[in-house]
Image: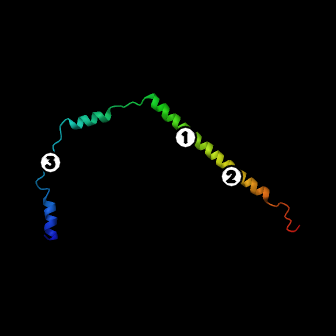
Amino acid sequence: MNQEQYVSKILNSLNGISNVIPNEDLFSKIETKMLEQKTVSMQTIWIAAASIILLVGINVALIHEKLNQNQNKVASILSEINKDNQLYY
């Protein structure tokens, strides 16, 4: 079987397929399900808000700790620098 026959066989394989006819009520059912308002319980909202606040608090604490560590490193380096510019003792 050469390539042209193979390609025509593949293209002609769809000739006998008929179109699918959907149920008449299907579109209206899908549309009504999409339009239904789904409510979220207040407990879920409070849990989500508390989680966000907790994560923001942890991030702020970690950033504050990291800044303090960097300031301590800079202060220790500055205290070790010889400030009198005396090269010979």
| Mark toward the start of the polypeptide (2 vs 1) | 1
The nearer-to-camera label among 3 and 1 is 1
Q: Quick check: marks 3 and 2 in contact, CB under 8 Å?
A: no
The tally of labels here is 3
- How many C-alpha atoms fall within 10 Å of the one at disc 1: few (<14), some, or many (≥20)? few
Question: Spatial distance from mark 3 to mark 2, Cα to Cα?
Answer: 69 Å
* Depth check, front residue: 4 or 74: 74
79 displayed left or right of 51:
right
The image position of residue 88, as x and y in percent, is 87, 68
* Depth check, front residue: 83 or 22: 83
Q: Residue furthest right?
A: 89
Image quadrant containing the C terminus = bottom right
Image quadrant containing the N terminus = bottom left
* Depth check, front residue: 61 or 25: 61
**Residue under the point 39% across and 30% down:** 39
**Residue under the point 61% across and 45% down:** 62
The residue beneath circle 2 is 70
The residue beneath circle 1 is 55
35 displayed left or right of 82:
left
Name the image quarter holding residue 28.
Answer: top left
Question: Spatial distance from mark 2 to mark 1, Cα to Cα?
Answer: 23 Å
* Amino acid carrying mark 1 in the image: Leu
The residue beneath circle 3 is 19
* Amino acid carrying mark 3 in the image: Asn
Name the image quarter holding residue 8.
Answer: bottom left
**Residue under the point 58% across and 41% down:** 58
SS under mark 3: loop
The image position of residue 13, as x and y in percent, is 13, 58
Protein image colouring:
rainbow
* Amino acid carrying mark 2 in the image: Asn
| Mark toward the start of the polypeptide (3 vs 2) | 3
Q: Is residue 8 above or below residue 21?
A: below
